[in-house]
Image (cartoon, rainbow, N blue to C red):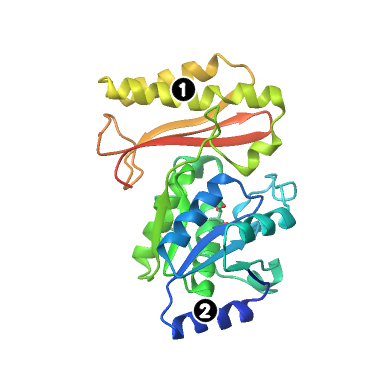
């Protein structure tokens, strides 16, 4: 596995791949990798000739007071895992490469970034779209892979790629969960054993709601109320938001549409914010 730290080195590899007609698959990450990331890597390797993974904790997607400084980092473990997984290139740039002195340009996908996580993290998606656009350009990705745990992120990135006539294909792959049901996240490492046990009420509430929808529940206000009620039973977990929206446009729904619905939420467990969701329809 090649480890590249500069944009110039990445351009050189990208141009070589292009000259040889190779398809470049790309998995952007913020590191501290887990099996969710590795499932994206595995799919990427299946569908492309060359697999590039980036590790960059992107400062512009963290708001004031958020966990940029404490975000978990372990590049040695990440490097080991990616090498074992057969990744071809690890792109590991520093902040100065991506945001040099005098950097001033940002990309915003309007409307889609307002609700859900955008309500409590107002500048988050502007940071995400900006870095993803930069990385897709630098890497020259034929296809790029994202997890559905960040469903709003995936919808916004798909829209950006469509609206800006970019050539990369965006793939959004299913959530990977621990055996107890908790969606894998680098932030799970913040949880104490007691908090982790408490956090399980969140996926349980979502799974219960999914079953109720499958049994005929359609009123979205009732869906939200039931999810909130299950979580409210647990004093260590506070709801940030629970929303039921259309999957394509992220607009609030009054009635569940079995072919186009995202039921998504965020909860606080102490100082840790966790997100999770389920989808009805094709992503
Ligand atoms: O999902 C993430 O880990 C990040 O938001 C991403 C896509 C790597 C951009 O920094």
Q: Quadrant of residue 89?
A: bottom right
Residue 205: mark: 1
Q: x, y percentage for residue 276?
A: 49, 35
Please state if 31 lies on the left or on the right of 281 as rendered. right
Residue 120 appears left or right of 222: right
Sequence-first tag of 2 and 1: 2
Q: Residues within 10 Å of mark 2 (few under 14, many from 20)?
A: many
Image quarter where the N terminus lies is bottom right
Q: Does residue 33 sit above or below 10 in this rendering?
A: above
2 or 1: mark nearer the eye: 2
Residue shown at 35% from the left, 65% from the top: 163
Q: Could you say where residue 273 lies in the image, as x and y percent from the top left?
A: 61, 36
Disc 1 is placed on an element classified as helix
In the image, what residue occupies the spot 47% across and 41% down? 175
Q: Is residue 123 visible?
A: no
Q: Is residue 13 above or below residue 206?
A: below
Distance from disc 2 to disc 1, alpha carbons, whole Å, reads 44 Å
Residue 224 place in picture, x, y as percent: 40, 24
Closest to the observer: 215 or 218?
Answer: 215
Question: Can residue 38 be seen at all in this image of the molecule?
Answer: yes
Q: Horizontal placement of 55 versus 182: left or right? A: right
Residue 155 versus residue 246 in the image, above or below: below
Q: Position of residue 188 (x, y in %)?
A: 64, 37
Label 1 crowd (10 A; few <14 / some 14-19 / many >=20): some
Residue 260 placement, left or right of 30:
left
Residue drawn at x 25%, y 34% is: 258
Q: Secondary structure at mark 2?
A: helix
Q: Which mark is residue 89?
A: none
């Amino acid at each position: 596995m090649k480890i590249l730290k500069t944009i110039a080195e990445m351009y050189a590899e990208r141009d070589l791949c292009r000259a040889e007609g190779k398809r470049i698959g790309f998995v952007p990450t913020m590191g501290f990798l887990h099996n969710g990331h590795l499932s994206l890597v595995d799919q990427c390797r299946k569908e492309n000739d060359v697999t590039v993974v980036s590790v960059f904790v992107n400062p512009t997607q963290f708001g004031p007071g958020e966990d940029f400084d404490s975000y978990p980092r372990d590049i040695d473990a990440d490097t080991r895992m990616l090498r074992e997984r057969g990744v071809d290139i690890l792109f590991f740039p520093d902040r100065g490469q991506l945001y040099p002195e005098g950097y001033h340009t940002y990309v915003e996908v309007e409307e889609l970034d307002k609700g859900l996580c955008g309500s409590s993290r107002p500048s988050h998606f502007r940071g995400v779209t900006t870095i993803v656009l930069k990385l897709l350009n630098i890497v020259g990705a034929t296809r790029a892979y994202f997890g559905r745990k960040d469903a709003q992120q995936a919808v916004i990135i798909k829209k950006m790629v469509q609206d800006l006539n970019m050539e990369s294909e965006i793939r959004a792959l299913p959530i990977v969960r621990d055996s107890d049901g908790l969606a894998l996240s680098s932030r799970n490492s913040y949880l104490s054993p007691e908090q982790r046990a408490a956090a399980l009420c969140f996926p349980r509430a979502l799974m219960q709601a999914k079953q109720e929808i499958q049994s005929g529940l359609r009123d979205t206000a009732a869906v939200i109320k039931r999810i909130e009620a299950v979580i409210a039973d647990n004093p260590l977990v506070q709801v940030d938001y629970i929303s039921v929206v259309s999957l394509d446009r992220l607009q609030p729904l009054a009635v569940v549409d079995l072919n186009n619905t995202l039921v998504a939420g965020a909860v606080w467990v102490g100082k840790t914010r966790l997100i999770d969701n389920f989808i009805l329809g094709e992503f």
